[in-house]
Image (spheres, grey):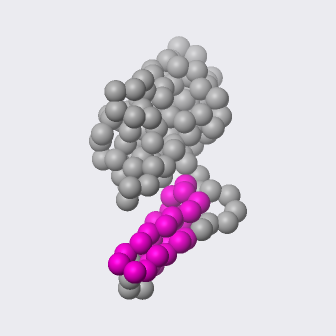
């Protein structure tokens, strides 16, 4: 495995919320670990909610990485969350599959899901809006 591939893998781990990655190519295995806190799994932006109560704010949950979005733990199973569901801090909202690694996207705060802006199986980019919690 050449150094440019290893650097790409290191950058991937640094930009995602995974803490360990193992990749084997031919007779070489590379294990990358990240110490400390995981990367943020969402970008929070407080803004007025589009509801009658203008004093409430919502938090946007955005994609921290590029990948394939999964709304359920497995095909045919119930979605992690639906519009109107109450969620707790750290509750899994989605999974993003990137390079065969499944990254959980969790709720940054407790509240009610007021919008879901992503479809199951869709490709998402860094910063794409996935949902909003009010």
Image quarter in which the N terminus is found: bottom left
From where the camera sits, is residue 45 visible? Answer: no
Task: Using the rendered view, name the quadrant where residue 87 is placed.
Answer: top right
Q: 55 or 87: nearer the eye?
A: 87
Q: 114 or 78: nearer the eye?
A: 78
Q: 46 or 65: nearer the eye?
A: 65
Residue 21 higher or lower than 121, as above or below:
below
- Return the x and y of residue 71 as percentages of the image width and height: 40, 34
Q: Residue furthest left?
A: 122
Q: Is residue 55 magenta?
A: no
- Residue beneath the point at 59% across and 52% down: 40
Task: Using the rendered view, name the quadrant where residue 92 is placed.
Answer: top right
Residue 37 higher or lower than 51, as above or below:
below
Q: Which residues are magenta?
A: 6-32
Residue 53 higher or lower than 20, as above or below:
above
- Return the x and y of residue 77 as percentages of the image width and height: 40, 26
- Residue beneath the point at 59% across and 34% down: 91
Q: Residue furthest top?
A: 52
Q: Is residue 7 magenta?
A: yes
């Amino acid at each position: 495995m050449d150094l440019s591939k290893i650097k790409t893998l290191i950058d991937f781990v640094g930009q995602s919320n995974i803490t360990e990655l193992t990749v084997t190519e031919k007779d070489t295995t590379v294990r990358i670990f990240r110490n400390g806190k995981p990367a943020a799994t969402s970008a929070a932006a407080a803004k007025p909610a589009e509801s009658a109560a203008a004093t409430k704010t919502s938090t946007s949950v955005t994609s921290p990485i590029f990948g394939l979005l999964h709304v359920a733990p497995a095909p045919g199973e119930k979605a992690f969350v639906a519009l109107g569901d109450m969620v707790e801090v750290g509750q899994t909202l989605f999974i993003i599959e990137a390079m065969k690694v499944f990254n959980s996207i969790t709720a940054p705060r407790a509240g009610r899901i007021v919008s879901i802006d992503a479809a199951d199986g869709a490709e998402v980019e860094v910063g794409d809006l996935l949902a909003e919690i009010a």
